[in-house]
Image (cartoon, coloured by chain):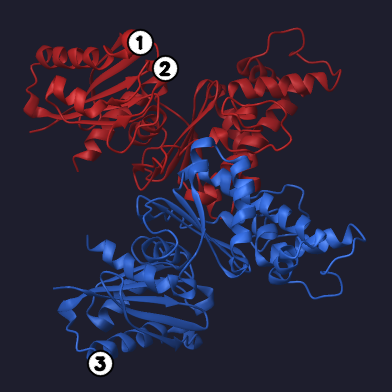
Chain colours: A red, B blue
Amino acid sequence: MKQYVFGIDVGGTSIKCGLFKADGTVIEKWEITTRTDEQGSHILRDVADGILTALTEFNIKKEEVIGIGIGVPGPVKADGTVLVAVNLGWGFKDIIGELKEYTGLDVKAGNDANVAALGEMWQGGGQGFDDMIMVTLGTGVGCGVIVNGRIVIGAHGAAGEIGHARVNLQEQEQCNCGNRGCLEQQASATGIVKLAKEELASSTKESLLRDNEISAKIIFDAYKVQDEVAITIVKRFGAVLGNALAICSTVVDPGVIVIGGGVSKAGSVLIDVLKEYFDRDAFPACREADIVLAQLGNDAGIYGAAKLIIDEQK
Amino acid sequence: MKQYVFGIDVGGTSIKCGLFKADGTVIEKWEITTRTDEQGSHILRDVADGILTALTEFNIKKEEVIGIGIGVPGPVKADGTVLVAVNLGWGFKDIIGELKEYTGLDVKAGNDANVAALGEMWQGGGQGFDDMIMVTLGTGVGCGVIVNGRIVIGAHGAAGEIGHARVNLQEQEQCNCGNRGCLEQQASATGIVKLAKEELASSTKESLLRDNEISAKIIFDAYKVQDEVAITIVKRFGAVLGNALAICSTVVDPGVIVIGGGVSKAGSVLIDVLKEYFDRDAFPACREADIVLAQLGNDAGIYGAAKLIIDEQK
């Protein structure tokens, strides 16, 4: 009986790998270095070697394996090909074809942010839901959208790019995407620091944030001890992100919105402020959505990758 | 061989019905009055009578019929039940169960705006695409979202409620939904008239729009003859709707955006102004989306309803 599955999450510096049972039980996790030299040509071979070693170690036959799910940092087309993944040194890559050739196992590939969302739905903060938006608040704003239990890819692989929703037409600085006023310019770890600098410059109010290096963590720590300037900053952040999530909810009407990434370490205070502004701006029926913290941290990718191939076999 | 299908579009005043071949060829169309008296209890029986009559008239056996698709004005759950459809006088209604009982045919039900979107994808402006947003600019802003060829319903039946995306936090007037600043307060047939009144009141500029009753049609007609005030109004309208569509595109990344409803009778000038602001604000990959006019007019619902039951049988 097919009961084992591999979940692989390829990052720019390391590759996380997991061997699971089909019910989500972890059997083994390991990590390997991402060799981006020679146009990243070793990456899939290294992944395959690890998988074959695990099969031997745990005495698992290939006939017992459902397959390999793999998430990569770049837009992955429905056929499992990638046109370019800059962080890996890849140009065009037939992920499914190569990994199948190296392992003799079935393969399914997806974008890493989308795959992480699927992981959180399967075994993390989104359990029990079929319709979900996951937002990852890190250097940028990543996002994966799930409808009816399946990742939404989009016509150009850009579904879930809500970090580049143009929410602020007054913004002067350019975003990495070339536009001005993208959500992630205000609502990421970098964005909240930008808001903080603006807020500190606009007044002379005393604050724990003055004379300190500022980070998302420092801002939320000051917010937790009622620092007035930090309160203003966090409320601005919550208003921008809560409004954007309310607007996005009118498109797919998620049952749950899962918040992950570095900024989410602020914990329940972050959820509270998001919920306040989301509730203010959301369409009544969409307001029913739960807003929760992600639970799987850096493992969301391997869980989601495993689920990707499990769903494929259904 | 099953080769015939019925598409039914239930509105508050009339019910449009179509008998199609599975390839989309229309065999017959007819319309009946919506009897909303007695809690709309005659509606599904009237629909069934029409269907049974058509079967006799065209000498079609039930074994040759794929089934009946039906769109209704209200949120329809995945199991084909409706909790309430005010325009029909309905409280809870098991559409599938009732219509199946009356006809002996398979039934699939959906929300009318969503079903119309499916129709435009199948036989109208969205042909050839799998991922689509359809926007209907009428009294309000209706919308249907299609991902991977299937209607997105959402966790609370509210997917596609982009008319209630809260895009203007400065708005003072209340929307029907209870919020303030919804997209449809600016970007519907009613919304553009509101924008026009604001614009006319804010200056004394000469305009064809003064001393006239104002409607979306009159505004676009004035725009076409270069009326300066009308140009300002249409550009404001285009900027609001183009920005909203750009933001919504980051969620599901449609291949095509189809524009229907009364306002769309303005034709290509409407598409041009929307495209201008959509291109300005959209994420680069999402900018590839086509923006086109709807083609099926009031028939979109019957086409989409037919497709709904065809897809169900796959």
The residue sitting at the front extreme is B225
**Contact check, label 3 and label 1, Cβ < 8 Å:** no
Front one among A155 and A146: A155
Which mark is drawn over residue B57?
Answer: 3
Q: Is residue A34 visible?
A: no
Which quadrant holds the N terminus of chain B? bottom left
Query: In terms of secondary structure, where does tag 1 sit?
Result: loop
Which mark is drawn over residue B109?
Answer: none
3D distance between C-alphas at marks 3 and 1? 70 Å
Which mark is drawn over residue A87?
Answer: 2
Chain letter of disc 3?
B
Labels 3, 1: one chain: no
**Which residue in the protein does label 1 denote?**
A36
Q: Amino acid at mark 2?
A: Asn
Query: Which residue is at a point 32% across and 13% down the rendered structure image?
Result: A40
Q: Does residue B128 sit above or below A308 in this rendering?
A: below
Q: Is residue B254 visible?
A: yes
3D distance between C-alphas at marks 1 and 2? 8 Å
Labels 2, 3: one chain: no
Q: Give residue A119's position: percent from left, percent from top.
A: 35, 31
> Neighbour class for label 3 at 10 Å: few (<14), some, many (≥20)?
few
Q: Give residue B138's position: percent from left, percent from top.
A: 61, 68
Mark positioned earlier in the residue sequence (1 or 2): 1
Query: Which residue is at a point 25% across and 17% down the rendered structure image?
Result: A44
> Neighbour class for label 1 at 10 Å: few (<14), some, many (≥20)?
some
Front one among B222 and B306: B222
Indicate the quadrant where residue A310 lies: top left
Q: Amino acid at mark 1?
A: Thr
